Image (spheres, helix red, strand yellow):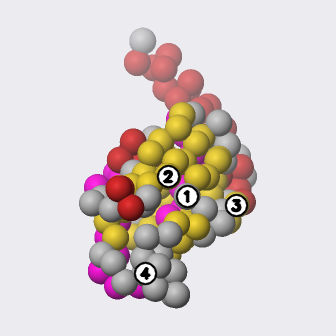
Amino acid sequence: MRTLMRPALLGLAALFAAAPASALDLTKKRENLPDLVLGNEEGNDFVVENKDITLEGGKAYRLRIVAKGRQEYKFYAPEFFRYIWFNQIVINHLEIHGGGPPDHLEFDDPGEIAIEFVAIKPGTYTWAARGLESKGMTGTITVK
């Protein structure tokens, strides 16, 4: 039985080796989403630009989360983070790669964090700047 399985495994390995690398890498053709902006430079720390975002499942995206206000923003989107595949998180042109989702993204000062990902599971997911929800610092990310 063991020798019968070996040719099948070799055939499967040859199939993957023959496939073009670009066909296997969804992130090569990612779409840049509008920035999700927390606060503004005019002094309104509690406005949100592009608070509701709609995506298509199975596609690659890049989302920049930008803090412009002077608050400490703790960006939580636990269900959304759980149901996407992260390619990388980029902060100041430094890349973070890993096998699992972050707990949250925190901004102590103005700046940006970009996440590159593939949307996996359809649904509507809530995000919030923890502790600032009552000031309107919430929104949704919908994957269709």
Mark 4: amino acid: Gly
> Residue 12 magenta-drawn?
no
Q: CA distance from mark 1 to mark 4?
A: 15 Å
As drawn, the label of residue 69 is 4
Residue 103, image quadrant: bottom left
As drawn, the label of residue 51 is 1
Which of the pair 34/136 is nearer the observer?
A: 136
Nearest to N terminus: mark 1 or mark 4 = 1
Mark 3: amino acid: Glu
Residue ID for mark 2: 139
Residue drawn at the location 65% of the way across and 47% of the way down: 55
Image quarter of the N terminus: top left
Q: CA distance from mark 3 to mark 4?
A: 26 Å
Nearest to N terminus: mark 2 or mark 3 = 3
> Residue 104 magenta-drawn?
yes
Residue ID for mark 3: 31
| Position of residue 18 measured from the top left corner of the image (x, y, whole percent) | 70, 46
Label 4 element class: loop
Mark 1 and mark 2 residues within 8 Å of each other at the beta carbon: yes
Label 2 Cα crowd, 10 Å radius (few <14 / some 14-19 / many 20+): many
